[in-house]
Amino acid sequence: MYKIAVLPGDGTGFEQVTEGLKVLKAAEDKFGFKLETTDYDLGGERYMRTGEVLPESVLEELKAFDAIFLGAIGHPDVKPGILEKGLLLKLRFDLDLYVNLRPVKLFPGVNTPLKDKGPDDIDFVVVRENTEGLYCGAGGFLRKGTPHEVAVQESVNTRMGVERCLRYAFEYCRDKRVRKKLTLCGKTNVLTYAFDLWERAFHEIGPDYTGVERDYAHVDAICMWMVKNPEWFDVIVTDNIFGDIITDLGAMIQGGMGIAAGGNIHPGKVSMFEPIGGSAPKYTGLGVINPLASICAGAMMLDHLGETEAAARIEQAVATVCSKKLKSLNAGQMGYSTAEVGDLVVREL
Ligand code: IPM
Ligand code: MN
């Protein structure tokens, strides 16, 4: 029995988690586990109604769950930054979810914009540091609003924070991957403090992980090679902002936001799983959004909880539905409604 907090969030988040949960529920009996879910109405609507984004009491409650299943955050009537910082980033930071794990895997039959590349070429995982870097909010304004205004935004990289993220990536690479190649994505030629620390830590702890090949590339080159030679990558580890950017690129080469899922993880503690795309408010309630990202996030959640067989079988079912049924992974072009796609995965499972 696992206790799951469900946060549908905004826009199409509700439709997405509904299908994600449908598939998780369908897996319960077959694989012998049970999910006890509790819904939380956090998001733009609640904020506009009550002014609350994430009350401290709710944050405390969330710590008692085995995992959090998140839909999407972002509301067109709420100023950008309020929900992102007050809810999504606050959860990541306050629950200390120091790894953002984002698989980039092209399933057979799914269209990629990369010409002549297929499932054998696009199959890697990004381990994004999730609690530091440019996201920590360090910096500020000086003389704001004047012609002499100064805005400083600092990237904070602690040895502890960097090392625990690197160790997660090394372990993941050693234990879960076949090729066992770990690429550090940085910018050592310009960001000579931050990535000096990353690079030193990378090579200092590397020898603890026998069998893992160490590789380094600058972030701009990684963007180039993710398009030109994605088959070069197995596991990529990087800081918060670079991880944010390269995983949107990753999502596009694996078939789009309709399928891209991620986990915000602190091993051994409550962790949070989500589609990596946004709330897509313009599609709200239309039943056209692709729920596969949420379904894949659900599979990642099960994997994290130790239900590895169920997780693998859901992923397999998603792959089959992609190759045999869906016309496209894009919203409104799937050939099926949101709920029908959930049903197809359940039937396949
Ligand atoms: C993501 C998103 C978030 C981020 C935003 C919504 C704050 O883009 O999960 O990648 O930048 O991390
Ligand atoms: Mn992002």
Image: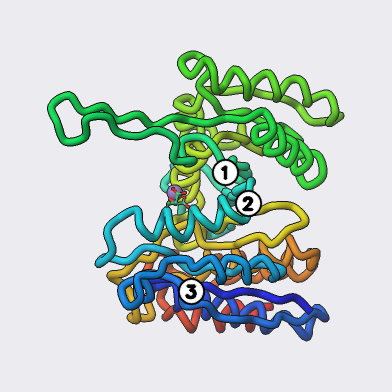
Which class describes the residues within 10 Å of circle 3: few (<14), some (14-19), or many (20+)?
many
Quadrant occupied by the N terminus: bottom right
Mark 3 secondary-structure assignment: strand
| Image location (x, y in percent) of residue 204 | 76, 20
Q: Residue at x 44, y 43 (%)?
A: 249
Q: Which residue is tagged 3? A: 8
Percent of width and height locating residue 152: 35, 29
Secondary structure beneath dot 1 equals loop
The numbered mark at residue 43 is none
> Residue at position x 62%, y 30% from top?
158
- Specify the farthest residue to the left: 147
Residue 337 pos. (x, y %)? 42, 80
Query: Which kind of residue does numbered mark 3 sit on?
Result: Pro
Q: Nearer the viewer, residue 203 or 123?
A: 203
Q: Is mark 3 within 8 Å of ligand 1?
A: no
Answer whether labels 2 and 1 touch (C-beta < 8 Å). Answer: yes
